[in-house]
Amino acid sequence: MIRVPRPAAPGGGDPHTGAGYAPCHHGEILQGVFLDGSGRRCAGLVTLPMAGPGSHATFVRRPGTEPGALTVVPADRTKAAGAAGLAVAECARRSGRPPCGGELRLAGDVPVGLGMGSSTSDVIAAVRAVADAYGLRLPPETVARLAVRAELACDPLMLDERPVLFAQREGRVLEVLGPRLPPLVVVGCALGGGAPVDTLALPVPEPGDDDVRAWERLRGLLRRAVATGDVRLLGQVATASARRGQQVLGHPEFDALCAVARRVGAAGVQIAHSGSVAGVLFDPAAPGLRHRVRSCLRALDARAIPATRTFTTCATTKEILNGPAHRGIDRQARPGAPRRPARLPAL
């Protein structure tokens, strides 16, 4: 636990107010069932980071009120409200102050139900805002534990930018795959017309030994791709994981998406295993990159697969192309503003 010094609030501001932020992601590079250090089977995933969209939260403590007297705006963010209540209890215990109620306000531009981590982003932003209101900064493992308690499974958005195999239902890191992913250019798109996916309604097949061995092999290949900076190998892993995910998701456009990737010389494709966003992956060092990206966009349009946003995973590389549907995406919304409709092309 780190105690954050809290200076006097400028201009007579409320010293009991805290702020928090969490990013989103663009689905997964790899997801399946893996073996942990003790040889036990464990569901895990490796997310594809995406800069820009995220959730912002503010929390105002109300000392002297009951801990249950907690309100959230917008009122439908029930998971974030539950996470705030858990965070209040945790921060009160750590700080020695009595728990109390308060008001949580959330704003963000992460679409709901598309596999981009919208609920986890809200939850983590809420936990961080509560901690900030108590003058604390909670360790990532504590944030992960609270997030899992609040929503049963979470994405590793509370961690740093290192690629990790993360046990989403247990809130722990199974393996740090390396210091950073190889740089990627991602042409984002929406499968299934961008309709939200109800992950709770999806079948959950019991994996066999062959399935686990296949996922462990992909894990080893991804570890090698990260260690060597091999974008082509990373794309092969992501494509294989996405293809296995189709056994549950069954996107009718998936084969067409893979055909587009082969035609334009992409490294592979990736999907959200619990949503409808997908991406065509390119090596930024590939010759004729701009032409490849434009050809990809035209090919997606010809197959009625709506393109969304072209972005990079490298902070030092400017985005190659921005589709008109994504201009203005990074403008911060006011706390309490309603979330945008979950239709990805309108992001």
Image (cartoon, rainbow, N blue to C red):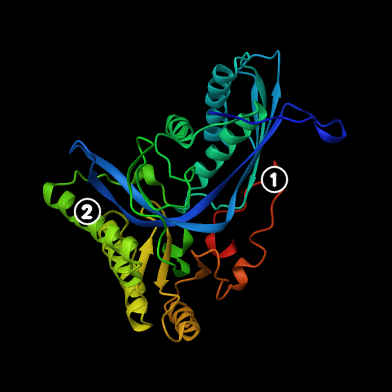
Q: In the rendered image, which residue does mark 2 sit on?
A: 215
Q: Position of residue 23 (x, y in %)?
A: 55, 50
Callout 1 touching callout 2 (CB < 8 Å): no
Report the side of 53 relative to 209 (left or right).
right
Please state which of residues 26 and 128 is positioned toward the viewer in this rendering: 128
Residue 290, given in percent of the width and then of the height, sits at 50, 83
Q: Quadrant of the C terminus?
A: bottom right
Going from N to C along the chain, the mark reached first, 1 or 2, is 2
Q: Residue at x 71, y 13 (%)?
A: 64
Label 1, residues with CA under 10 Å away: few <14, some 14-19, many ≥20:
some
Residue 223, image quadrant? bottom left
Image point (44%, 83%), residue name: 292
Residue at which label 1 appears = 337
Q: Nearer the viewer, mark 1 or mark 2?
A: 2
**112 relative position to 240: left or right:** right
Secondary structure category for the residue under label 2: helix
**Alpha-carbon span between mark 1 and mark 2:** 41 Å
**Of residues 159 and 277, which is closer to you in this image?**
159
Can I make out residue 253 in this image?
no
Q: Which mark is residue 219?
A: none
- From the viewer's perspective, is residue 107 above or below residue 320? above
